[in-house]
Every structure is written in structure tokens, then in C-alpha cells.
Amino acid sequence: MQQKLILVGLNHRTAGVEIREAYALAECDPCRLGLVSPEGPVTEAVTLSTCNRVEILAVADHTTQPEAILAFWAETCGGSVGVLGPHVYVHQGLDAVRHLFTVASSLDSMVMGEPQILGQIKDAYRASVDHGAAKVILNRLLHKAFSVAKRVRTETAIASSAVSISYAAVELAKKIFGDMSANRAMLVGAGEMAELAAAHLVNAGIREILVANRTYSRAKELAARFKGRAVPFENLTALLPEVDIVISSTGATEAVIRARDVKPVLRARRNRPMFFIDIAVPRDIDPDVNALDNVYLYDIDDLKEVVEENLAARRDEAVKAAAIVEEEVGAFSRWLESLELQPTIVDLLSRGEAIAERELAKTLKRLGPEVDPATEEALRTLVRSVARKLYHEPIVYLKRRTQEEGRAQRIIDSTRRMFNLDGDQVPEDAHAERKGTVVPLRPAQCVHAAAANGQDNDNDS
């Protein structure tokens, strides 16, 4: 194929939290920012930005070099290639596919087996679709990544002993306080990580949970679920003297708790120790807080020690999971190769012949042993001829439509799905949500996606 996959990224192993927060790509629109354009070399892109990794996966013409993606990334974040470059890894072609499947299966996470990364990749893909930056190849690749992750979790025990960052944070708190039945905790932020932290705190026997969130209704909802107490976000500092543990995971772009806020709190607590866990990137808690007496502040990198205790138990399962990933990389490679016209024609004709042979075998069985060899050969010639004639017009159509500029991959992909040439398992309720509905064109789609009437953004089954 004339296009190639390029993945440029960094993670918790290649970059410290300072670099990760400086080069985060939250809410990045590759179309609006000019990475993906109808005339440019990059035709599709998705950006993933989490606490532990930032990645750009692009489909580009074969002349594009990873340096072009890196330069776009640095410029978007107002940084420089010189600062960003030493921290990134690059994967191209099937190595990029393998990396994506590995990440989606949580084999590359700080906490191997944790489930959050799959949801984060789904969110990133959804944003790419909304921006009009995901087309034939990324649609197929991302949906394949989701199915690989499901296979890994179903066929291995990688998730049975999994823990999340939130769980690791609570484990750290247990090491500090031991029995937590006399302690109160405050969750700053009410997202998925806060929800998980609340569940683990309750399991650890915490006395009470306070939830502070900018959207107060969400704080009330989360607090009610765990029999806790919602507090207004603006009263966060005033309520700090009541709590022993603070776990913060907001999406704020700057610190929400600073050293000057904590100093009077310590006096009010008569210097009883406080434990802060900051699992947000960018960080929610000013690092200067750690310089105060009787304060213990841990950021997301500090959780590595807790996480690594669990790695050994999962090593064997990771080997099984890696074998599944490798098998699926091979399957995706075959699909990529099939996007050329000739393999699809061969697959269509082979499918027709296979159906003809199956139906002939059923007929011969019904006719019994009295069918002579000449009659059997005549029937075989007949059914094969019918199959070839049935596929003649679709093949002529394919040859004509794939001559159109920029349409070949979509036409071939649609044909392969229509005749299920890749043998995909399609659930009975596939596309059920689309029946009888008209999908309006999204205003956020970029110009070239609109020109394609939105069809390039169709998802796989």
C-alpha cells in the first residue's frame, strides 16, 4: 500500500511527569490544527493523552517521516523538538499496530491489566471520528484493537489480579496509616479514577469520604454512591483540616492545592500528619507542599513501587497475552494487504467457488451414488460458472470505482465487509442502533470528511 502507519509517543517510562504534563495533547483536533488535511501527506490521525502516555498515531503517505509528526506535536504544545525528542519512541508499520494492540490490552500500562486505558483509547477514537480524522484504516485498526483487548481479558488471567492507579494509591495510604477506620479521606475530582479510589477506600475501611468537584451535582452523585459527603469545590481548603488523606485527580491545568493553603491547615490539625496522593497530570498539588513538615505527598510516578509488586504474578499471563497480540497483528497485516484491488478480486472468486462446491456436495448427497462421473463434472462446471457470473458485475464495479481519486480503500473495505471476506464474527445486533435513523452531519467534521458525506467515518461492525 502507498500509505503507512506512524506512531510517535512517550510514556511513564520514557518521560517524567514534568515532560508528560508539558506535552499533553488533551482535546487535540488534528484537522483544525492542520495535521490532517485533504491535500497533505497525513490523511488520518488519532491522539491519545492520559496521565501516563501521550501518543499520535497517523496514517500518512510513504514519504512522510516521523520527524514531521514530532514537529507538529512540539509546536502544538508550544515546546521544542529538542526538548521533546529525547523522550519519544517511534513505531512504524506493523510495529505501530503491535504497539497499539499491546497498549489497548493494558500490557504496556504502569499497572499491567488495569482497565482504564481501553476506555481512554475509545474516548480518543471517538474524538478522532468527531473531528473527521478517522477513516478506513484507523476505523478498522481501532476496532481491531478493542477486540484484541477483549480477547486478552477473556482468554488470560491478566485482569484477574489487576489493580488500577487508584488502587495503588489506596494501597500506599494503607502502608502509611495501617487501619484506616479512624481516618477521613477527601477526593478532589469526581471522574472514573476518583470513583475507583472511593471503592477501594471503602473496601479498606475508611471512616468517611468527602468529595469535592467543580460540578457539584457530580460530587453529590459520587458521594451518595459511597455514603460519603459532597462538599463545594470552593470550600475545599477550608475542609482540609478534617481529612487525613487527599487523593486528587482533576483535569485542572494548574495546581488546585498549594503550599500556602496547607500551612494553616497543619496548624489547625496540631501537626497531625496529612497524606496527599496526586494522580493527575498536569499535577493538582503543588510539589512545594512536600517540603512542609508532617506532610507526605506522592505523585503518579511514586506509585510505581506499589505497582511493581504485582508485576511478577502477572508475567506468565503477559506471555500468553503477547501471543494473542502477535496473532492479531498477523490478521491485521493480511487485511492491510487486502486493501489492494487484486487480492480482493481473488478472495471474491474464491468465496464464490467455495459456496458452489458446498452446494454441489449437498446436491450430490441427495442424488445418491447413482450419479455418474460425467454428470458430476457437468454439475461442477455449472455451479462454478454461475458463481463466476454472479461476481462478474461486482468485480467490474470495483475496478471502475477504485480508479476514482481517494476512494479505492473505502470501496474495497466496504466490499470486503459486505461479503465478509475476512471471516469476521458479526453479532446479530450489529448496526441495530442505525436502523430507521438518519445520522446528521456533524459541524465539527473537517472539510474533506464533509465532502465524503460522512461515509468515511463509518465504523466497523
Image: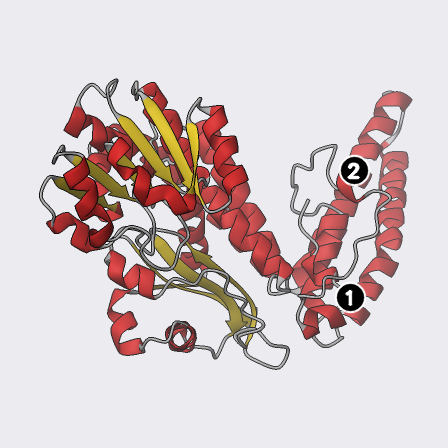
Residue 404 at least partly seen: yes
Residue sitting nearer the eye, 369 or 275: 275
Report the residue at 52% width, 32% height from top. Answer: 221
Which amino acid is tagged 1? Asn
Q: Earlier in the sequence, mark 2 or mark 1?
A: 2
Q: Are marks 2 and 1 in contact (CB under 8 Å)?
A: no
Residue sitting nearer the eye, 359 or 374: 359
Name the element at disc 2. Answer: helix
Which amino acid is tagged 2? Glu
Q: Could you tell me how far apart the alpha carbons at marks 2 and 1 are, in whole angstroms? A: 40 Å
Above or below residue 457? Residue 360 is above
Which of the 4 image quadrants contains residue 91? bottom left
Above or below residue 121? Residue 72 is below
Kindly report which numbered mark, 2 or 1, lies closer to the viewer in this rendering: 1
Give coordinates of residue 341: x percent, y percent.
69, 64
On the rendered image, what quadrant is the C terminus found in?
top right
Report the residue at 54% width, 38% height from top. Answer: 217
Q: Few, some or many C-alpha atoms within 10 Å of disc 1 (few <14, some 14-19, many ≥20)?
A: few
Report the residue at 84% width, 52% height from top. Answer: 438
Query: What label sits on residue 357 in the rendered view?
Result: 2
Residue 158 at least partly seen: no
